[in-house]
Image (tube, rainbow, N blue to C red):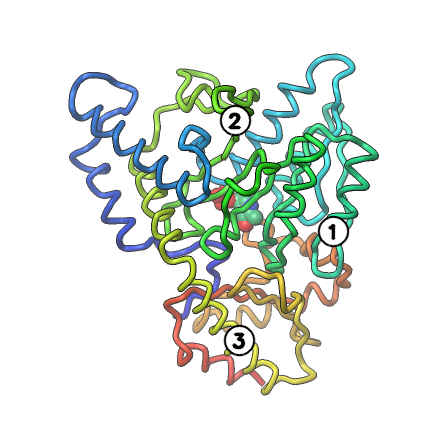
Amino acid sequence: MLYLDNSATTKIHPEVLEAMMPYLQEEYGNPSSKFYSLAENAKKAVAKAREQVASLLGCDPDEVVFTSGATESNNMIIKGIADYYGREDGANKRLMTTKVEHPSVIETFNFLGERGYEVSFLDVDQYARVTVEQIKEAAAQTQPLLTSIMWGNNEIGSLNPIAELSALFEENGLFFHTDATQVIGKVPVDLKNLKGVRFLSMSGHKIGGPKGIGAAIIRKQSKEIYTRLTPLMHGGGQENNYRSGTLAVHNIVGLGKAAELAAANLEQNVQRLTELEQYLTDIFKTNLSGKIKFNSDEKDKIPGLISLQFIGVNNELLLKKLADYVALSSGSACSSSKPSHVLSAAGRSLEEVRQTIRISLEREVSEKDLFIFKKIQ
Ligand code: PMP
């Protein structure tokens, strides 16, 4: 079966699995223990992985906090900042995001909205993007404590202008978070040049790493001063007090290796995904002209992610029909039971939402594999 749902999750990379195995077997020490070699080896492995993630993203290793994934990173950053800075009477309790974020951002905002925070969900354009002018105006008006805007959308694949937004937030000094889960390994991410991005979320299983591991990047205020936030997990004080709990060393090692590979293969990956996307798009344009409509813009998008409507065809029926041959989705795996809030916010009708499927490629796919789409009439 052909797997083309790589935005939902990816197969673990063989080198990642190989790197992890010793930490599931003989190297089982707790990195918080001391003196004996099992503990020291685990500690060294975690430090190496932290360097690998930091090097991929262009930040300092002590700005990397290991979490269970991007859902936790998003929760940790948004709730943590809201609570730490917003708990005093009279403090700024305004938080800003968009209507097309992942549910782990939207629902966290809703949770905070029910607890007295003033949350706003900004409109997006037909490709689910915001503009810098729009954010500049909204930020100037409300001076939000924190603004959270995703880098790349998981359903449509559109990219937001993160470099320009970073410059804006660097200038106005307000906290800015971006959920970069879908862009790692597909778009260059270099936080050295993005000083206004104070927080970033990422996940291991979208980049050939294991599930249940991710990172929250919490940038320091200066070389010595850490940014404080209220942790989600209280306990032994691991991860610089940001996230207590015994570290999942095997998963952390896997994330580190996946990060190293994502950095090393970025260019080739982008080139191959772009080629494959072009090839598949041409098949659709040639064979199904007038019967399909693309949801994404041709530029400023995640390479290899195609969202398209089959006019007059119910997406669930189509996916079921294809399920023995090819694994695809109607949009996001996390909210597959509800009509897409992303497409609705981007102006698509319910009918159009119900005709949409998402194809997310990976570089190992061949052109021949994609012949299957020539059979769709
Ligand atoms: N944010 C985005 C944009 C995502 O696509 C996903 C995964 N669907 C997440 C957050 C959640 O990631 P995780 O599965 O690691 O919790």
Left or right, 364 with respect to 321, comes to: left
Q: Tell me if residue 235 comes above or below residue 256 in the rendering.
A: above
Indicate the quadrant containing the N terminus: top left, top right, bottom left or bottom right.
bottom left
Q: Residue at x 36, y 35 (%)?
A: 50
Left or right, 76 with respect to 209, comes to: right
Q: Which mark is residue 220?
A: 2
For the residues labelled 2 and 1, the Cα–Cα distance comes to 27 Å
For the residues labelled 2 and 3, the Cα–Cα distance comes to 41 Å
Q: Residue at x 66, y 77 (%)?
A: 292
Amino acid identity at mark 3: Gln
Q: Secondary structure beneath disc 1?
A: loop
Of residues 192 and 286, the one drawn nearer to the viewer in this rendering = 192
For the residues labelled 1 and 3, the Cα–Cα distance comes to 26 Å
- Residue placed under numbered mark 1 in the picture: 131
Left or right, 225 with respect to 107, comes to: left
Q: Nearer the viewer, mark 2 or mark 3?
A: 2
- Residue placed under numbered mark 3 in the picture: 278
Mark 2 and mark 3 residues within 8 Å of each other at the beta carbon: no
Q: Position of residue 340 (x, y in %)?
A: 67, 55
